[in-house]
Amino acid sequence: MRTPVIAGNWKMHKTTGEARALARAIREGMSETDHCQVVVAPPYTALAAVAEEIRSSRVFLAAQNVHWEPKGAFTGEVSIAMLEELGCGMAIIGHSERRQYFAETDETVNRKVRAVVQSQLQAIVCIGETLPQRESGSYHQVITQQLAGGLAGLTHQTLLRIILAYEPVWAIGTGRTASPETAQEVHGSIRDWLSQKFGREAAQQVRILYGGSVKPDNIADLMRQPDIDGALVGGACLEAESFLRIVRFNS
Ligand code: PGA
C-alpha cells in the first residue's frame, strides 16, 4: 500500500561533472524499476545538471535543504520556487548534520515543513536520537519531541505531503546500522504517534524511511520490517553500483 522510497543523500559530494556521471549511471541502471520510488539529492550546485540527466526517467530529484521564506535578504539560502523551477520534487528537511552543525532546530524544521507542504514539493523530514540519548533510554521522548515540534500545525491532509526519515545519529556514517528490530521498534512507535495525532488512516499512508549506514547487504532485512518503507542512504549512494543494489532490495 505504501510505495517504498530509496533516497540517496549525496551531502557535500560531487562536482557538477561528477554528479552528471553518477545520475546518468543511476538512470541507466534502473530503467525498469517500478517497485520503489528512487530519489537523488545532489548538492544545490548540481541540481540543474542532474535534472537534465534524469529528465523523462523515473528518478526523482530532491534538494538537501530549503528556506521557508519565498524571497528576501537571506544570503546563502535557496527558496522553494527556485527548487521547483529546477525540477525538484522534494526537499530534505532537518537532517541531523544540519541540526548538529548549522543550528537547525525543531522550530526551523517546522517553518520549513509548513512552507513546503503548501508548495508542489514534498518534504523528507529527518528525526533521530544521538548516542547518549539512546543509551540513557530517553530516545522515545526525543523522537516524540522532534515529531511534535517539527510537524506542529500540520493537518491530516498536509501530513500526506511529507515523508519521515528516522535516522539515529549514532548510525549515520558509522557503519553501525540499527538492527532491523531496533529500527522497527522506533518506526512502529512513530506510526503510533502519527495515528494518535492525525488519525489511523493518515498515519498508515505516511512513508517512514530508515537512515544510518544502509548498505546493499543490510537493506533487504530492514525492508522486511512492517513499518520501514524505504531508506535514506548516505555513503553507499555515492557509487551507482552500490546505490542500485540498494534500489534492487527485493531481488
Ligand atoms: P550514511 O548516511 O548512510 O552514510 O550513514 C545516512 C544519512 O545521513 O542520511
Image (cartoon, rainbow, N blue to C red):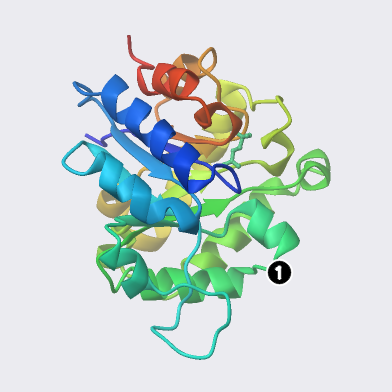
Query: What residue sits right under mark 1 in the picture?
Result: 103
Residue 228 appears in which quarter of the rendering?
top left
Identify which residue is drawn at 65% across, 69% down: 105
Rendered residue at 31%/57% (across/down): 88
| Residue drawn at x 46%, y 42% as measured from the top left | 17
Please tell me whether residue 192 is drawn above or below residue 2 in the rendered image: below
What secondary structure is found at the residue carrying circle 1? loop
Q: From this viewpoint, is residue 1 visible?
A: yes
Is residue 27 rendered to the left or right of residue 137?
Answer: left
Q: Nearer the viewer, residue 82 or 217?
A: 82
Rendering coords of residue 142 (x, y %): 68, 55
Query: Foreground residue, 174 or 239?
Result: 239
Q: Residue 238: x percent and y percent?
A: 53, 31
Quarter containing the C terminus: top left
Q: Is residue 196 above or below residue 8?
A: below
Residue 61 visible? The answer is no
Q: Looking at this view, name the residue that lies furthest to the left.
A: 56
Left-right relation of 128 to 133 = left
User: Which residue occupies the extreme bottom position in the image?
Assistant: 73
Direction from residue 246 to residue 144 in the image, left or right: right
Q: Residue at x 59, y 57 (%)?
A: 144
**Is residue 91 depicted above or below 168 in this figure?**
below
Ligand 1 is within 8 Å of the C-beta of the residue at disc 1: no
Q: Residue furthest front?
A: 17
Looking at the rendering, which quadrant does residue 87 occupy?
A: bottom left
Rendered image quadrant of residue 86: bottom left
Residue 13 coordinates in the image, percent (x, y): 59, 43
